[in-house]
Amino acid sequence: MASENRRTHHQVTFAVLAASVSAYALLQSLVTPVLPTIQEDLHTNQNTVTWVLTAYLLSASIFTPIMGRIGDILGKERVFVATLGALALGSLLAALATNVDVMIVARVIQGIGGGVLPLAFGIVRDEFPKEKMSAAVGAIASLTAVGAGLGIVLAGPIVNALDYHWLFWLPMILTVAAAVAAALFIPKSPVRTPGRISWLPALLLSAWLVALLVALSQAPVWGWGSGKVIGLFVAAAVLAVGWVEVERRSAMPLIDMTMMRRPAVWTNNLVALLFGVGMYATFAFLPEFVQSPKSTGYGFGASITQSGLILLPMTVTMFLVGLRASAFAARVGGKTVVLLGSLVATGSLALLAFAHTHTWELYVATAIMGVGFGLAFAAMSTLIVSAVPPEQTGVASGMNANIRTIGGSIGAALMASIVTASPAPDGLPRESGYTNGFAMLGGALLIAALAAALIPATRGRGRITYTGESPQAELALAPGGTVVGDTSE
């Protein structure tokens, strides 16, 4: 590891973090457009191959907050390197998989990589100059969404030039390089939380997330009213209540419920949930819409590569806007930026719903979408990091990312049900299914705008600095830019 006494320049640290987060983000979506190819090559059926996505989603949802908490205790840089190692191992196993069972196990191992995001935010908070923190957090937050969109763009060209195995080989190479660089250049964590992992809360958290996400992912197949789906939802609710109670009574909680109740935390988490609904469902269903045959009257008959390119404007604008979002937030406030991003993203979904006759309309809509997502993601991440003491950065940002993933599961399940609700005689979805689905996603983002209005206004603009002594203190930005304690709950 890098010496604790010789701090690596923060720009080197940022380069390592950016490469690591990009590798994880790419793996979120690279396989989505090529599931039919994987299904054929591994000689499985459609229901089984969907677990290549579901297993990754479940694993990431469980391990993201857990790895963030472990990093807070043991040291962020050590756990960051270990997380990258798991991501690389899972990628290697997936690249070599010769049957679907091995592929699913590989995707579970890859899901451990979800911990890179909260750990990266914590490292930024530990290592960066105060005036650089907000920009770095915003850029890394944008990279997660940019990478997910870019994965869909790159999947087609990679498969055409090589084969689908390289969808795992390439991220593995990037991840190994990032892990070596992290071990060499990221300094030891100066901020740690004494304690141990509470395994009962971890088990209950895992149980209710598994029940919820399996129900959401399988509801379009089993039926929303089926006994299995209803039973899983009931189990998720009971387990979630039990998890909260255990966390509240624990002397060393995995996730501090007092922290989760803070207005600055729960409001941003609600916005993240709704943005997950809108963003990930769009990633999954817009390429499918474009790939629909021209005979449907609405589809473009696009190839995997062509459909992926529809999302390219979004990845470009999201990244560029994300880089400048922190400077914008410093002028107008993070709450305003999240609200504006929500409204812009709502407009882009309205365009997709009602103006999708020509490809140029789709390019315009996705470019606008990138602006909205870039603004909101960067500002939300900064607000979350600002709202908690340094020793809780990992678990707080991990839960925010986790909640966004859960929102993606909800959005994908609802979108699948709406799109396939009334198929045409040939079995393909009708145009009205996509129109209603995109309108539903736009409605979720409009609700996100209403939720953003509930985010506590900050007093003044400034950088991320926590000075509150009490872990129960509420936070606000003082005119000089310092986060100060406020005992109000």
Image (cartoon, helix red, strand yellow):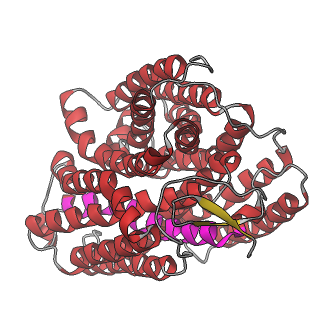
Q: Is residue 489 above or below residue 397?
A: below
Q: Residue furthest front?
A: 480
Image location (x, y in percent) of residue 167: 34, 32
273 magenta-colored: yes
Q: In this view, does 151 lie above or below 99?
A: below
Quadrant placement of the C terminus: bottom right
The residue at the point 81 percent across, 41 percent down is: 197
350 magenta-colored: no
Q: Is residue 234 left or right of residue 185?
A: right
Per the rendered image, the range of residues in magenta is: 261-290
The residue at the point 33 percent across, 27 percent down is: 166
Image location (x, y in percent) of residue 209: 67, 57
Report whether residue 130 is seen.
yes
Image location (x, y in percent) of residue 71: 67, 36
Q: In this view, does 90 lie above or below 316?
A: above
Location of residue 292 by image quarter: bottom left
Which of 194/271 is in front?
Answer: 194
Q: Is the magenta stretch mostly helix, strand or loop?
A: helix
Which of 223/454 is in front?
Answer: 454
Image location (x, y in percent) of residue 68: 65, 43
